[in-house]
Amino acid sequence: MRLEPIESDALDAVAYDPITRTLLVQFESGGLYAYDDVDQQLVDDMYGAQPHPWSVVGERVKAHSYRRLK
């Protein structure tokens, strides 16, 4: 997956793999997280919520299992 920049106060970039339903989120702080079993609608909602995507959908994203990659 290739991280794409996103307009946000908290995030630097995101990537989504619809086959594995994995969402990668890179925060401005440098942390990189992979969220599992995320549906396309949530990703679309995230992009639609720019410039404050994490404020709008962050709680929904954090409800998924995740792991820190970096």
Image (tube, rainbow, N blue to C red):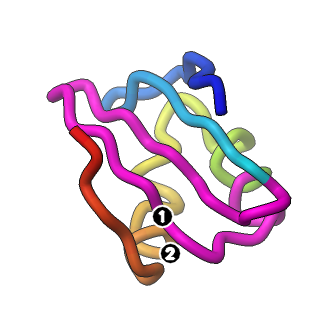
Q: Is residue 52 positioned above or below 41 on the image?
A: above
Location of residue 20 by image quarter: bottom right
Q: For residue 24: magenta?
A: yes
Q: Nearer the viewer, mark 2 or mark 1?
A: 1
Residue in front for this viewpoint, 30 or 60: 30
Kindly report the distance in space between the C-alpha atoms of the residues bearing marks 2 and 1: 11 Å
Residue ID at (53%, 21%): 7
Residue ID at (40%, 22%): 12
Asked which secondary structure carries label 2, the reply is helix
Quadrant in which the C terminus appears: top left
Q: Is residue 46 positioned above or below 56 on the image?
A: above
Residue in front for this viewpoint, 48 or 18: 18
Quadrant in which the N terminus appears: top right
- Describe residue 27's horizontal placement relative to residue 2 as left or right: left
Q: Position of residue 4 (x, y in %)?
A: 62, 20
Residue in front for this viewpoint, 49 or 28: 28
Residue ID at (44%, 27%): 8
Q: Position of residue 2 (x, y in %)?
A: 64, 24
**Residue holding disc 2:** 60
Q: Is residue 8 positioned above or below 44 on the image?
A: above
Q: Is residue 2 positioned above or below 54 on the image?
A: above
Q: Amino acid at mark 2?
A: Arg
Crowding at label 2, few (<14), some or many (≥20) Cα neighbours within 10 Å? few
Question: Which segment is the magenta one?
Answer: 18-43
Location of residue 32 by image quarter: top left
- Describe residue 28's horizontal placement relative to residue 15 as left or right: left
Q: Amino acid at mark 1?
A: Tyr
Say which label, 2 or 1, has the lower sequence index.
1
**Residue holding disc 1:** 35
Location of residue 62 by image quarter: bottom left
Q: For residue 14: magenta?
A: no
